[in-house]
Image (cartoon, coloured by chain):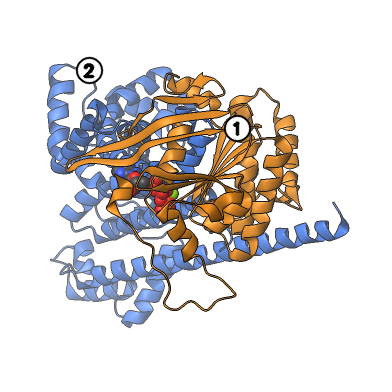
Amino acid sequence: MSTLLDVEDLRVTYPTRTGVIEAVRGVSFQLGRERLGIVGESGSGKSQTGRAIMGLTPPQAQVSAKKLAFDGIDLMAASPRERRALRGNRIAMILQDPKYSLDPVMSIGRQIVETLRAHERVSKAEARERALAMLEAVQIRDPARVFDLHPHEVSGGMGQRAMIAMMLIAGPELMIADEPTSALDVTVQLDVLKILDKLVAERGMGLIFISHDLRLVSSFCDRVIVMYAGKVVEQIKASELRNAQHPYTLGLLDCMPRIDADRHPLPVLDRKPEWAA
Amino acid sequence: MSVADNQAAAGRGSAQAVAVLSAIGRFLAIAVTTYLGLLAVTFFIGRVIPIDPVLAVLGDRAPTAVVERTRREMGLDLPLIEQFYIYVKSALSGDFGTSVLTTNPVMADIRRVFPATLELATLGTIIGAVIGVPLGVLAAVKRGSFIDQIVRIIGLIGYSVPIFWLGLLGLVLFYAKLQWVAFPARLDVVYEYTFTPITGFYLLDAAMQGQWDVFYDAFRHIILPAALLGYFSLAYISRMTRSFMLNELTQEYIVAARAKGLSETRIIWGHALRNAAVPMVTVIALSYAGLLEGSVLTETVFSWPGIGLYITNSLQNADMNAVLGGTIVIGSVFIAINLFSDLLYRVLDPRTKAR
Ligand SMILES: Nc1ncnc2c1ncn2[C@@H]1O[C@H](COP(=O)(O)OP(=O)(O)OP(=O)(O)O)[C@@H](O)[C@H]1O
Ligand SMILES: [Mg+2]
C-alpha cells in the first residue's frame, strides 16, 4: 500500500494570555488509499488535526510536526501558495453544516464551478457541464435546477451533497470529512454517507472520516484512530474493534446503546488524567 | 425538460412575479403612509408656530378688513381638517404656495436649489463609498496593522470634529492660503450668467454641453465641500465595512472557500465583501441621507446655494411656505432613499426573495 499521507508527531498549539492551549499533542499516523476514522469526544483535537493537514488553522495557531507529507510533498516546507494549489485540488475537506459552510449569496452551481476554475483552465461552458455531471454524481435528480438555487433554498441533505460535489469536482486524492452528517436529519444521514462512500471507492481516494460516533466509524472505515485530549490513545482496525485494549476506547464502546439490553443505569464515560499524559 | 418540469418552472415564475408585485405593493403602502405622516407633521408645525401667515404676507400694518379677506382667501377660516385636506392635495400636486421672500412659487425655488444639494451629497457619498469600502476591507483583513490604525483615527476625527469647523479650516487652508480651490459658491460669477443648466447638476450639465471650462470651474468649487462630506461619509462607511467584514471572515463558508483552494483576493472580495455588501447598502443609504440632512450646516459654511441654505434663509424671514415645502422635499427624498436601499437589499440577498 503506497502512503498518501504521512503524519508524524503533529502538534497544534495556541498561545494565549493565560498559557498555551495544546489542541493536538503529537499525533502520528499513515494513510493510504483507505478510509481512516478519527473518533473522540468533543475537544479532543479531531478537527484541529484535519485543519492542520489542510493548512487551514487560524493564523495564531502554531503547527509543528516531525513529518507531514502528502504524496511525498513536505507540507511543512511548502509555501502558502503551494499549499493553496493542493487544497480543493488534491486534498479536499467537507465541513459539518451546509447551512453555514455554503456561501449564502452565491448560487450552488457557481460555488461548484468556482472550485474547478481555481485549479483548471476550463471554459465556462465546460465548467458548467462538469458541475452538472458532479451534481448528478451526488444523486441530485434535477441538476440544472439545483445549479441555480441558492443554499437557503435546499434542504440540509441536498446542501451537503452540493458540498460534496463542490469538494470533489477537481478530483482530489484525499478527502477529509469533518462530521459530514452530524448536522443532518437522521433520515438523510445514511443517504449522504452512502454517496460519499461510493464516490470515495469509485475514485480510489483516501478518506479521513472524523466523527463522534464510534459505531458509524467502525462500520464505515477500514481503520480507526481514537483521540483523547489531543493524543492518539488507540489505533486499530475497524474489524478488530471489539478487541480494543485502551480503557477509553472500551468506555466509548460501552457507551453505545444496545437494542437487546435494558441499560440501567446508563454507563458514564471514564476519563483518567494519566491517559492524557 | 419534460412538460411537467416546464409547468413547474412556469409556476415558479408566476409565483415569483406575485412575490415581486406584493413586495412593490407593500413598498408603496409604506411610502404613502410615511409621506402622509410627514405632511401631517409639517402641517401641524405650520399651525402651532407663533407666526401668523396672513401678517407674514401683508405686514402688521394692514387694515383689519384686508386681513380678514386675505385670511378667507388663504382658506384659514375653514375647519382644520378641511385645511389639512387642501394642504395634502396641493402638496401632492407639488404646490407648496408662494415664497414671501423670493415671490416665486416654492416649488420653482426648490427645483432650482435642490439639485445643488443633491449634487454635493451624491459626490460626497461616492467619495465616501469608493474610498471607505476598500479601506474598511483592508482594515478588517489586516487587523491591528498600520492601515487599521488609520481607519480608526479617521473614524475618531469623523465622530468628534464638527463639520463646520473642519469646513472653515479647509477654506482657510485650501482657498485662502494655498489657492487650490475656488471661493465658496457654485460657479465663478462670469459663468453664473453665461451657463444654462439642464438638470441642475452643474458637473453633469457642463459635461453634456461640452463646456469643459465650466466643468473645471464647477469642479474647483464643489471639490472642497464634496471632499469634506466625503470625509465624514468615509469615516462612517469604513468603520462599518470593517466590522461587517470582520464578522463575515469568521464564518464557516470562508473556511470552505479556503478549503476549495481559492485565492485570498477571491475569498475577501468575492465572498466576504459580497456578503458584507448586504448590510452595507443600508449604511451607505443612511450616510447619504445624513449628508442631505446635514446640508444646512455645510451649505452655510460654503455659501452653497442648495436647499439647506434656502431653508435657513426662509426660516430667518418667517417664510413658512418655503420652510415647510423644503422640509417636505427633503423628507420625501429620505423616504425614497430608504425604499430604494430596501429594494437593493432584497436584490443583493437571495434569502429575502422568497419572502
Ligand atoms: N482558535 C483557537 N484558539 C484556542 N484554542 C482553540 C482554537 N481552536 C480550537 N482550539 C482548541 O482546540 C481543542 C480541540 O478542538 P477541535 O475543534 O479539534 O475539537 P474536536 O475534537 O473537533 O471537537 P468537536 O467534536 O466538538 O468538533 C479544543 O479544546 C479547543 O479549545
Ligand atoms: Mg470538530
Identity of the residue furthest to the bottom in this view: B79
Q: Are marks 2 and 1 in contact (CB under 8 Å)?
A: no
Task: Name the amino acid, label 1.
Answer: Gly
- Judging by the rendered image, the residue that carries numbered circle 1 is A32
**Residue A3: quarter of image:** top right
Q: Which mark is residue B268?
A: none
Taking B50 as reference, is A237 above or below it? above
Question: Ligand 1 closer than 8 Å to the CB at disc 1?
Answer: no
Place of residue B111 in the rendered image (x, y in percent of width and height, measured from the top left): 39, 47
Secondary structure at badge 2 equals loop
* Location of residue B112 with respect to B84 vertically, above or below: above
> Where is B151 relative to B25, above or below?
above
Total numbered circles: 2
Q: Nearer the viewer, residue B1 or B304?
A: B1
> Chain B drawn in what color?
blue
> Mark 2 = which residue?
B180
**Dot 1 lies on which element?**
loop
Rendering coords of residue A274 (x, y %): 29, 49
Mark 2 against mark 1, which lies toward the viewer?
A: 1
| Colour that chain A carries in the picture | orange
Q: Residue at x 26, y 56 (%)?
A: B100
